[in-house]
Amino acid sequence: MRDIRPRQWRKLAKNLCLDSDNLLVRIRDFARRTPDVIADLGGAVERDGLHHALIERLVSRITERARRCEKMIVDDISAAATKTE
């Protein structure tokens, strides 16, 4: 996952005959929502009685990765918008 960047998403969109900008916006939105969803899930698992350090670490790492992904996508969308102006 760490090697998937906006360039690869754009290439995938092209191969699937999709609009790359729309795909990136959807991925950005997904990445933006992921930290809250994963925090809720981690909390639910703990409330159900599963307590393990791995859960906390997974929540933290997935949140970090989602935030980095969102930033890369936002930066790419901004750069693409600047090129078309």
Image (cartoon, helix red, strand yellow):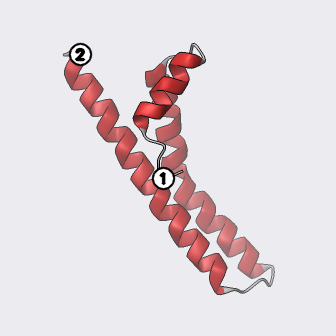
**Mark 1, other Cα within 10 Å: few <14 / some 14–19 / many ≥20:** few
Q: Within 10 Å of the Cα at label 2, are there few (<14), some (14-19), or many (20+) other Cα atoms?
A: few
Which of the two discs, 1 and 2, sits closer to the camera?
Answer: 1
Three-letter amino acid code at disc 2? Thr
Which residue is at a point 30% across and 39% down the rendered structure image?
A: 75
Residue ranking furthest to the top = 17
Q: Residue at x 36, y 48 (%)?
A: 71
Establish if 58 lies above or below 33.
Answer: below
As drawn, 52 above or below 2:
below
Residue 2: x %, y % from top left: 48, 53
- Quadrant where the C terminus sits is top left
Q: Quadrant of residue 17?
A: top right
Sequence-wise, the earlier of marks 1 and 2 is 1
Is the Cβ of the residue at disc 1 closer than 8 Å to that at disc 2? no
Which quadrant of the structure image shows residue 62?
A: bottom right
Q: Which mark is residue 45?
A: none
| SS under mark 2 | helix
Q: Position of residue 42 (x, y in %)?
A: 66, 72
Q: Is residue 81 left or right of residue 55?
A: left
Percent across and percent down for residue 29 are 50, 41
Q: Which residue is mark 1?
A: 2
Name the image quarter holding residue 73.
Answer: top left
Give the vertical position of 19 relative to 4 (above or below).
above
Label 2, on which residue? 84
Q: Residue at x 57, y 77 (%)?
A: 57
Q: Amino acid at mark 1?
A: Arg
Comparing 22 with 12, the one in front is 12
